[in-house]
Image (tube, helix red, strand yellow):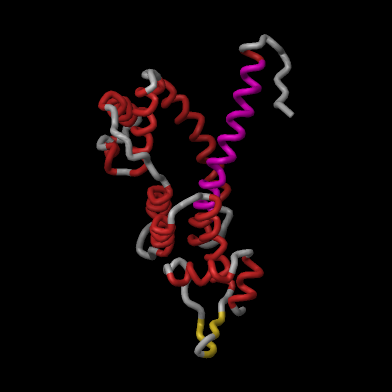
Amino acid sequence: MRVGELSKRSGVAVPTIKYYLREGLLPAGVLTSPNQAHYDDEHLRRLRLVRALVDVGGLSIATVREVLAAIDTRDESLHNKLGAVQEAISQPSTGELDPLAVADVQAFFARHGQTECIDVTESNVTLMLAAALSSARSIGHDRIHELLDPYLEGLKIIAKADLEYVIQHTSPDDVIEAMVVGTLIGDTVLKAVRRLAHAEVSRGVLSGSPDSDLPN
């Protein structure tokens, strides 16, 4: 297909496709003439992924490039690839860490045998957790770390569901791409469902009402 058809099928404007090509986010097409290139379904799939990362995930072009590099690495196990991608799409805040919050995170890891995570600055994911607890402490919520253990137990169920969803795909690349998009969109879905759950539980606990229907 030519770039115009690629644009039509993907919903991405031609100037944006050309920008992605210049930035190396989309492989070059096969030249059919000095001013024409041919694109295939692999280009379409990659373009849709890039669009999801930018538009849904809100990731910068530099971060998208990191995610794609992790996906395209051929000499890593699928587990390691998933970890590399999770690191790339996790963006911790840059504020100062509270030493007590860091200690809370370290104690949490130690309780669950994650000794490799003791230095919270070595990973975007662990740094993101330490930064969140630091923010909580800065506004007087010093005990929010008490939620970490119950959160972990509940989220293991969600993580299992996530993996069962993505491994339905046949190729490793499809698994990775499903995990990226599923994580980014899933984070938004979880926020919404969590708020609905708060409303349901609050109705029963705080209002004394036996009615636990979700809000309309």
The secondary structure making up most of the magenta span is helix
Q: Position of residue 170 (x, y in %)?
A: 56, 60
Q: Residue at x 62, y 26 (%)?
A: 197
Q: Residue at x 73, y 17 (%)?
A: 211
47 sits to left or right of 104:
right
What's the magenta region?
178-203
Q: Measured along the vertical axis of the image, is residue 46 above or below residue 30?
A: above
At horizontal 47% and vertical 71% (from top left) the residue drawn is 21
Left or right: residue 157 compared with residue 146: right
**Quadrant in which the N terminus is drawn:** bottom right
| Residue 79 higher or lower than 197, as above or below | below
Q: Position of residue 14 (x, y in %)?
A: 58, 71
Q: Is residue 66 magenta?
A: no
Query: 74 or 211, which lies in front?
Result: 211
Residue at 51% across, 83% down: 30
Instruction: Name the outermost residue toward the top.
Output: 208
Q: Relative to the observer, which residue lies in front, 100 or 178?
A: 100
Placement of the C terminus among the 4 image quadrants: top right
